[in-house]
Amino acid sequence: MVRLAVTPTSSLVDEPVKICISGLAPSQLVTLQASLTDEKGLLFHSRAFYQSNGAGEVDLERDAATGGNYSGVQPMGLFWSLQPEKPFYRLTKRDVMHSPFWVCLDLFDSFHLIPPPSVRCIQIREGRVRGALFLPPGGGPFPGVIDMFGGIGGLLEFRASLLASRGFAALALAYFAYEDLPSFLAEVDLEYFEEAAELLLKHPKVGGTGVGIVSVCKGAEIALAMATFLPQITATVCINGTNAMNGTGLRYRDLHIEPIPYQFEHLRLTDIGLFELFHAVADTQTEGHQDSILPVEKAKGKILFIVGESDRNYNSKAYAEESMERMRRYGKKHCTLLSYPGAGHLIEPPGSPFCRYSRNPFFDQPLMWGGEAQPHAAAQEHSWREIQKFLWQHLGPSGSSKL
């Protein structure tokens, strides 16, 4: 009798699982498939081809896929290679606490992506701040982390909930296109983000004298500004961001930074009808743009830049290197760079499906994010470990780590 075994049967998305098939004939060819339906009812699926060994078994930790959505030994390949049945859609998890994902695996088994066990979620509507605070089990105090995403707006909770499951009090912070916040980000009001940092620091379950940030895309640009100007910020993770204010200016008390305008005349349309924003984000070294560059040498805390070298949204590696060079010129050693060949723009926690392109509410055509599936998946796995190490080192008590 053919049997598919998945252990454990429930897991967080960043935890590897073991998938084995037994009861096959020796050297039998088998197709293993996975499918998932997201919160919007959209179907995602993946498949891979394997050949059983002499005992009639396939073990994804040991055996190489011969084709399908990936090849080689990829224990979690069926998860990160999930692709939408409807083209140009990205799998995003907004409500992590009330609607866990089921991943169905042929042969007639299923795997449950659960909400973080014992993690508590508190909706935040204090002052101007809007978001969701995820607290680990126990009395604390816990290191505080603000989690921010980019240009799609709204509130995304999945990464903050995972951070809470790893011991951080994580605030998933919305900053536009959510509830009573502005529907469009016309200007970055840094006092809003300072209010969020103060709110997190004052929470009775949060310890320490500073907070961290994990951020991507436009959120990483804002996070770098927070690290530059806000004394509350101790550790900042910028994933594929820029080193200047682009498109939207920044205001903080009596400070105002004019943005570098997007050059939409340089927006490229690929052969399959995708927009590439890469060339529409102007070179910061161009004359007249210098005043828009963030003076990162003012940052008091540590900064970790994470970049995908095949990012087609931003020239993120060049922006990170410019920030690091600026810090060196001022004698600062506060920055670290992790650069991943073959990785694209949307570097997320491990197990997250690779997304090379998807729709964006602010563009008529889907956007190209870039990257290749297998190196991107490897970058997600490695960077997630490094993010946690970095946060524990600079936020945890006495540099402790729970990894």
Image (spheres, rainbow, N blue to C red):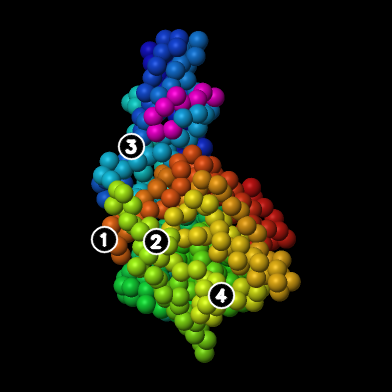
| Tag 1 near tag 2, CB within 8 Å | no
Q: Earlier in the sequence, mark 4 or mark 3?
A: 3
**Which numbered circle lies on residue 277?**
2
Q: Is residue 232 shown above or below 149?
A: below
Q: Answer yes or no: is residue 177 visible.
A: yes
Q: Which residue is mark 4?
A: 294
* Nearer mark to the viewer, of 3 and 2: 2
**Which numbered circle lies on residue 25?**
none
Q: Nearer the viewer, residue 327 or 387?
A: 327
User: Disc 4 to disc 3, how far (Cα)?
Assistant: 42 Å
Q: Main secondary structure of the magenta part?
A: loop
* Image quadrant containing the N terminus: top left
Q: Amino acid at mark 3?
A: His
Q: Earlier in the sequence, mark 3 or mark 1?
A: 3
Residue 292 image point, x, y percent? 51, 78
| Tag 1 near tag 4, CB within 8 Å | no
**Which numbered circle lies on residue 364?**
1
Question: Residue 365 colored magenta?
Answer: no
Q: Residues within 10 Å of mark 1 (few under 14, many from 20)?
A: few
Q: Earlier in the sequence, mark 3 or mark 2?
A: 3
Residue drawn at 52 percent across, 77 percent down = 287
Question: Residue 63 colored magenta?
Answer: yes
Q: Residues within 10 Å of mark 3 (few under 14, many from 20)?
A: many
Q: Amino acid at mark 2?
A: Leu
Residue drawn at 37 percent across, 46 percent down = 100
